[in-house]
Image: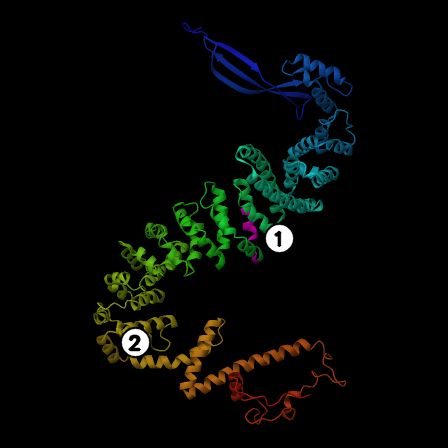
Amino acid sequence: LRGSDLYFLFYFSMGCTLDVHPTENALIVQYEVEATILGELGAPMVGERKECQKIIRLKSLNSNTDISSLAQKVVEECRLIHPSKLREVEQLLFYLQHRKQSNGIEELLCRCFLQLDEEASINNIDEYVELLYEDIQEKIRGATLIFQLARNPDNLEELIQNETVLGALARVLREEWKQSVDLATTIIYIFFCFSSFSQFHGLVTHFKIGALCMNIIEHELKRYDLWQDELQKKKKKEHEKSFRKYQSLLIKQEQLLTVALCLLLNLAEDTRTELKMRNKNIVHMLVKILDREDEELLLVVISFLKKLSIFLENKNDMAETFAVGKLARLVPCEHEELLSTTLRLLLNLSFDTSLRSQMVQAGLVPKLSSLLADEGQRQLSMCILYHISMDDRFKSTFADTDCIPQLMKMVFDCGEEKMDVELISLCINLAANKSNAQVICEGTGLKMLMKRAVKMKDVLVMKMIRNLSQHNGPTKSLFLDHVGDLAAQITEEETEEFVIECLGTLANLTIPDLDWALVLKEYNLVLYLKDRLKPGSAEDDLILEVVIMIGTVSMDDSCAAMLAKSGIIPALIELLNEAPAYLIDLMHDKNAEIRKVCDNTLDIIAEYDEEWGKKIQTEKFRWYNAQWLEMVENRQMDEAGEPFLYEEDGESFIGNRDILERPDLFYSADGIISADAAISPEFYTDFYSGELTQTGYMSR
């Protein structure tokens, strides 16, 4: 009573659930209490609900206790238990009466099965299994109870000893998974618990659960397509009702797909098992699921694809199924782990040129650029963008995004700290495009880059500046303010790598208004350039940049005259004389394009210089002859273990060692066989030029 207001407090006991105490002879009653405060007029004002539990200890319970009488007494004395639960109380008391103190896994299983049939004999586990699977609902209930046991890793070692139970679970899953999604999901969850530990993979494989999961996934995907078709055929009035039903079915199906894929992902630790999955089209199934909306399912699918993507065949499957386009819709998304996993998969795929093309077509460049502001996803996004930027076809797509401004901000925010290699590498690639270069140099962009490069002696930043300097137009004219800074770096004291980039940048500045004569004199560059042309004075890369630089400044007549007076021209001629020898060395390079260019260049040199022509011809002959000799030697070694492989008339060819030393076995031809029976270099030249006519063959 407060003032003139009256408050009345009422308590209502809600429905209860029963369980046994894990260690004592006692029942646990779990119930809810709801308290409601009514106002003066009887209207509810405040309500609260609370979960409670009561323990009923059964001190008199022993092996001789009459279970029926005790159950009746418990129900009568505990008002929380409704009389309708009398049979359930009897079941629990019966279990407590026979429960062993060890409380091992077999006893826990007994408890599960006893809840299904009060008349079961607890001395025979096999009977419990049969009772467990009398109908679908009972099977679901029993499987759920076993799943609760399997969730605790401590129980798995004991549970694996009871092969009857696991075999029954596998059999029911194999025979009845189509009848109940709930049943299939629960049983797969049980085996998933085992698959989480490598030592139990043999058990899961023994019952062929992995193959069964593959069949289930394939079937559920077909069922999903049928649902979609049926929804399309429904009229407007029927569609809403059917859609609600479809949604509830979809939730259960996606839960089933999630746990089945989790199990398969665990089993895929073994590459042989993973190969079997691929042979059953796992990649196509996973890509098809990417259309779903359930984030947990998508996380499992993308994690699986990421694991598979490290193999070429799987990567090709993803390319064929256009997985990139489906992944693009998840970038960005609010689920952090899903976004991160998606980016990691895209990074794996971005090593492939065709897949990078799909990424650009799917609009991933602006999406990834927007993620540069997210510190958690920045590194992954930057690596993918770097791979895309490696292709000249896609560099221009960056100019219309906010990627470059963000990158420039990140560069300047580094201050004097070392810059991430991914960041500067991406900047270097983008600077090679004219449109990007204009965006980079906007405002004080070029000035800030020059300041950092010169102050930090940063080779990579200078490499970026060098790329910027190669573009004609307004960008190049901006370098007029920095010519002096660049020229000042070209000294013997600076590192060669840094000087190379500075020289390369200056060599790109073909600007009419630039007074090169003044620059050369002020920074004493003529002497430096001349000294670098001396044999052995510098590495090839630096010499190349010196030559290019000389070519650039020579376009100015006054500079050309200055260089001529300095004695640089003889040094250039001497350098040119070394070129054929250098090209001969590169003639056998591993890179096919380099070999092609060198071969063509050497042909031109040989055409105009007879002396070099003979040297080139001899070198080519020596090279190809060496390859032929090596082939013969390898063949003889291979055949050494089979001396009679080519036996004829009781004598093997391998044993006849002087066969190649008998010129009488060859048809003679002028210019082909020399006095010492060796093939001349001239024969090689004619043969490879296609001018040799057929004159003979080796005879046995």
Q: Determine which of the numbered discs, if any, sits on residue 530 in the image.
A: 2
Residue plotted at (56% across, 91% down): 672
Q: Secondary structure at mark 1?
A: helix
Residue 234 appears in which quarter of the rendering?
top right
Q: Earlier in the sequence, mark 2 or mark 1?
A: 1
Number of other residues with Cα within 10 Å of mark 1, as a class: few under 14, some 14 to 19, many 20 or more: some
Which amino acid type corresponds to the residue marked 2 in the rendered image?
Answer: Lys
- Say which residue label 1 marks: 278
Left or right, residue 336 beside residue 84: left
Q: Position of residue 536 (x, y in %)?
A: 37, 76
Q: Secondary structure at mark 2?
A: helix
Relative vertical location of residue 226 with respect to residue 353 in this rendering, above or below: above
Left or right, residue 398 beside residue 105: left
Task: Assign the magenta stretch its main secondary structure.
Answer: helix
Q: Position of residue 543 (x, y in %)?
A: 35, 73
Residues in magenta, as a range: 302-312
